[in-house]
Amino acid sequence: MRRRGRLPAAPWLVAAVTLLVAAARPAGAAWCIARSGASDKALQSALDYACGPAGGADCAPIQASGLCYLPNTLAAHASYAFNSIFQRSRAAPGACDFAGTATVTVTDPSYGSCTYPSSPSTAGQSTTPGSSSTPSNTFKSPPSTGGGLSPPDIDSTDGAEASAIASFLSLALSCFMYMFLQLW
């Protein structure tokens, strides 16, 4: 028989894990990743831009010898490169667009030994001007259509939306914990 006012252990465990996950992620952290509906052609063009001299992403980790090379997919490599530029821009609004092939997430996309940067200080070094660290042996570029991508659209609000989502989740967690402790 359960005593009134006492909750089973399962909600405590869920609350503790949720709190630990929230605490482990930097406050307001956001990452830029490839949009799931983006075409391979558009992603390849965006990756070429990001890893090229104009984009300046740190693409060394997605090279064959890099920690983020696997999975060897266009979406995974583009996500890493997009996030490199996004973090270096200090998650500025519009810095995660790449002609509509990218989106902001508040869920850390890191996996295994591949850690996605979450701030400018952890975003790595860009290639030197005139050189490119595009994973040339990974994917073939589509035929050129008159140039690469232009810099991201500055009018986009992806960074602001991610910040709003992070704030909402933090507030929701606080409300949940308050209500939970009131019942305890």
Image (cartoon, helix red, strand yellow):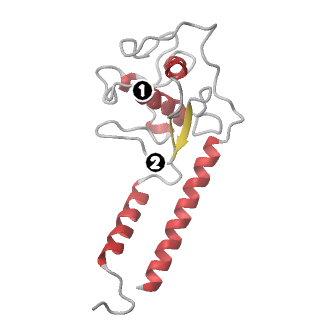
Residue 107 is marked as 2
Secondary structure at numbered mark 1:
helix
Looking at the rendering, which quadrant does residue 46 occupy? top right
Total tally of numbered discs in the picture = 2
Q: Of the residues shown, which amino acid type is indicated by label 2?
A: Thr
Q: Which residue is mark 1?
A: 77
Residue 27, above or below 130? below
Position in image of residue 164 (x %, y %): 61, 54
Image quadrant occupied by the C terminus: bottom left
Task: Please name whichever residue, 67 or 97, is drawn nearer the observer in this view of the structure.
Answer: 97
Comparing 4 with 168, the one in front is 4
* Residue displayed at 27% across by 92% down: 1
- Discs 2, 1 touching: Cβ within 8 Å: no
Q: Pick whichever, 123 or 140, lies toward us.
A: 140
Which residue is found at the position 35% from the left and 20% from the top? 63
Q: CA distance from mark 2 to mark 1?
A: 17 Å
Tell me the amino acid under the disc marked 1: His
